[in-house]
Each structure stands twice: as structure tokens, then as C-alpha cells.
Image: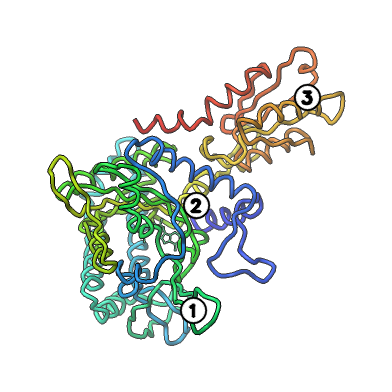
Amino acid sequence: MANDDQFKKVISHAKEYGYVFQSSEIYDGLSAVYDYAQNGAELKKNIRDYWWKAMVQMNDNIVGIDSAIFMHPTIWKASGHVDAFNDPLIDNKDSKKRYRADVLIEDYCAKIETKIDKEVSKAEKRFGDTFNKAEFVSTNPRVVGYQEKIESILTRMGKSLGAEDLADVKALIEELEIADPLTGSKNWTDVKQFNLMFGTKLGASAEHAMDLYLRPETAQGIFVNFLNVQKTGRMKIPFGIAQTGKAFRNEIVARQFIFRMREFEQMEMQFFIKPGTQKEWFDYWKETRMKWHLSLGLGEENYRFHDHEKLAHYADAATDIEFKFPFGFKELEGIHSRTDFDLKQHEEFSGKKLQYFDHEDNASYTPYVLETSIGLDRMFLAIFSNALVEEELDNNTTRTVLKLPAVLAPVKAAILPLVKKDGLPDIAKQIVEDLKWDFNVDYDEKDAVGRRYRRQDANGTPFCITVDHDTLEDNTVTIRHRDTMEQKRVKIADLKDIIKAEVDVKHWLMKMK
Ligand code: GAP
């Protein structure tokens, strides 16, 4: 299936099966704002819990907080967001459409990458089993040329943006002959900076109202609570503070469904370390976060690191974990070595000391910070789009199946009475009553059992449990596995253990070891 078609399918499946709805849909929607529906809210919660378990509860030296969205406005001055949280925008004079200049350039590079992929798959077909991808990519002159072109474009863009040389960013767009993706026009304005923070007001009367911002990241709530948590939790460096929560950005070009939203959720962790150890911890968190991703089984080939050329104003090293979305490899998570920038800034702007007294060294210092920051909605999209497949079956039919990692699936098991009579529904409902203490389960008696299986497959439910007439005799049921479609006869009393073995967080997180 072409990637565009696949992506359209993802969006319509998310709606049809109660995962994601356009916000305010009956009023024609609100651009780049989405609501999570009955299944989406469960999936999102399970992803958040999976992250929290791995980051907070499995690490003795990491604690979690939940700071407010409203924060003192000076925080955003101190953090640099008021002055530097900008995106370079460019308008097309003919179409009047607005774009992010860096995204236009990145999309241009993504097209070159598609050419590389095509060369690779052609060669794969030509050479068959003897094909060595790594060797081909590093020696084929055409592929090497494409790669060098991408590198030189991104390096130049990184340098120009870093030096605030917006004229050169425009020059690059013109040299590459990048056209408006909608109209093909190359008639561009100059590149300008645009601040992404949403402003709001706090206070009852207009005259006394205080100007506030909706937080554009959750990280600052951690920095300003650093000393409170360190002292009350008697935390010793190295230690981490984590939180999950909403963040808001007035994105210029909000598109690609829940990939780039104006209201979204982050899962962030700031790890406070001794200055000088940042390289070691950067490597540690790069590896640990990648292991977390791989534990979910979405396929190693779908992830890659992308080290930053252009560093954010607070970082001395940064990398993205990129994921292969239906529209190509894009950032899923950022890992940033933020130095002591934030704590020092907050010391200066608040006038309060934010230092750590190291008993071993008998000295105080401002800790350095290693940050891991992942968008919950982006992780949702990565998992959901990877899971949705159309399978050809032996009997020449197809089935749509949502192969969500069982640990994250909204509904773990559906309990289905074969028929709506002979006491089968009562037994099925009793199984629901027993299992719902441990799992989110569903009861479904409508339609033929084959159709119910298909419905649960498309909903991502890992197990279907069918109660039939033999159940009346021997207290056994059929358990059907979503991915293999294999069916087994098991005792009702064993159901809890069978399901637990596959959906338990421990079973999945142990893969990180
Ligand atoms: N505290 C650091 C920080 O916020 P970031 O790279 O701007 O860094 C971190 O954002 C993560 O948040 C990204 O990797 C992405 O997953 C997610 N994210 C950022 N902007 C987003 C948006 N507009 N919509 C959805 N997710 C977003």
C-alpha cells in the first residue's frame, strides 16, 4: 500500500474504531486539535503508564511530579522561550499559504531519501539473497551522491538557522527551487521568526490581569521544583524528576494528524548530574530510551538516531530518536544535554539559589541536566500506524488487524457467547465480572462469531474468548489469539494467568534488560 494511502487508512481507522476524533467536529473542527475517544484514551493511558513504570517506578533515583500548566511568566523569560522559541516562517506570495522554512527544506531532503529507498529496493530485487544493503548504500555512486546532497543541505540550513541568517535560509529555498507544495509557485517572501507560545490572562479584571503563557514544554515545571524535590525527597545526584502533561504550541504548520498538534502531551524526565559527566549520561540515556522503544516490538528497522547539527539554545549535545511514520522518518523523542543553562537562568531571574550540596565533595554546584522528552501523541501515532495491517488470508479473503503490543491494547480480551441463548450469555458475563478486576475486557454478543472476531481484530484486542455449549459440560472455553488466529481450548479458571502472561508490563519491560 502506498504510504499516503496507508496514512489515510490510519486516520479513518482511528475514527471508525473510537480512537481519535477531530476536536469540535460538529462545529467543523479546530485545526490541529484532537480528542481521544473511548479506545484512544485507554491506549494513551497505557502508553503513559508504560513510560511511567519504566522511567519512574523501575528507577530508585527517579521520582515523578505533576506541576501546574500555569506558571509565573518570568519563567519563560528565564528559559529563553520569550526571546528564542521561534520557528522560521515563510509565506508564498501567490497562494498566501504559510510554511515553516525549515520544514520545506527537510521535506525536500525527504524526497531525496525516497530516491535512495527506490535505488535500494531495485538493487535488492536485482541481487536477491546476496544483497548487502550496508555495502550498497556506502558504495553505490548514485546513492552516495544523494546522501552527500542531503548532508550538505541540512548542514547549511543548521548553520544559517543557528546564526539567525534568515536571508540564507531563503536563498537555500530558492537555490533548491523549492515550490509551494500546494500550487507549485516559487514566489516566496523573506523568512521571519514567529514565537510559538500561546498567551492568556490570569485575573478577574482586565486592568489587573496578569499576562501568562500556556506552557510550551513540561520541563520548566521540573526545573523550578528542582530544589523542593531534592530536599523533600533527600535525593542524591545523580537523580531524575519526571512528569507527563499537556503542552501548547501555536504551530505554524500543524498537519499530519496527531503528529504536530497545537495542544499535546509530553512525557519528560530531567536527570540532574555532576558537571563533567554529561557525555557518559547522554550515551546512557540514548541507549536506555532506545531499549524502551525496542521492548515494544515495533521493529528495530523503524528507528534511527539523528544527531542535531543545530543545537537548541540550552543544549551542548542533542539527538532525536526518529521513527518511520507512514510519511517517513520523523522525530519521536528528543534526548538533550541541557548543561546547567536552565537552573542558572532560574537562579538569575528568581534571585534564589538552586544549588546542590555534594556531601562527598563537600562542595556546592549547579547540576547539569540530561533530558529525555517524548510526545505521547506522537508515540500513539507511531504505535497505531505500525499496528494497522491488512492481511491476506489462506481462503483468499483479507482481514484488517490492529497488531497493538498486547501490553498497550485498550481491551485485553473480548468475551463472546457463541449464541444468545442456552445460558451462554450468563457464563460469558460471569467471566467478564471475574476478569475485569485485572484487565479491561469487553462483552460482545452481536452478530456471528466470525464477524465478532474480525471486529475485535480491527480493534486490536489480543484475545477473544468464546463460550459455547461444551462450556456447559466442562467449564472450558476457546481462546483465540489475534495475531496467529490460533484457537485453543482452556479452562475458565486458567484464563487470568493465560492473559496475564502476555499483557503484563513486566513481561514487556523485561525485554529492556
Ligand atoms: N523539553 C524539550 C522539548 O520540549 P521538543 O523537541 O521541542 O523538546 C519534545 O519536544 C517532544 O515533544 C518531541 O520529540 C515530540 O515528540 C513532542 N512534540 C513537540 N512538539 C509537538 C507537537 N506540536 N505536537 C505533538 N508532539 C510534539
Measured as percent of width and height from the top left, residue 209 is found at 49, 79
Disc 2 crowd, CA 10 A, few/some/many (<14, 14-19, 20+):
many
The kind of residue tagged 1 is Ala
The kind of residue tagged 2 is Leu
Q: Quadrant of ligand 1?
A: bottom left
Quadrant in the rendering for residue 436: top right
Any mark on residue 381, and which?
2
Q: Can residue 342 be seen by looking at this rendering? A: yes
Is ligand 1 closer than 8 angstroms to the Cβ of mark 2? no
Q: Can residue 150 be seen by looking at this rendering? A: no
Quadrant in the rendering for residue 181: bottom left
Any mark on residue 209, and which?
1
Measured as percent of width and height from the top left, residue 350 is found at 29, 67
Q: Which residue is mark 3?
A: 427
Is ligand 1 closer than 8 angstroms to the Cβ of mark 3? no
Any mark on residue 296, and which?
none
Disc 1 crowd, CA 10 A, few/some/many (<14, 14-19, 20+):
few
Asked if the residues shown at circle 1 and circle 3 are in contact, with their CB atoms under 8 angstroms apart, the answer is no
Sequence-first disc among 2 and 3: 2
Quadrant in the picture for the C terminus: top left
Sequence-first disc among 1 and 3: 1
- Which residue of the protein is positioned furthest toward the top in this rendering? 474
Q: Nearer the viewer, mark 1 or mark 3?
A: 1
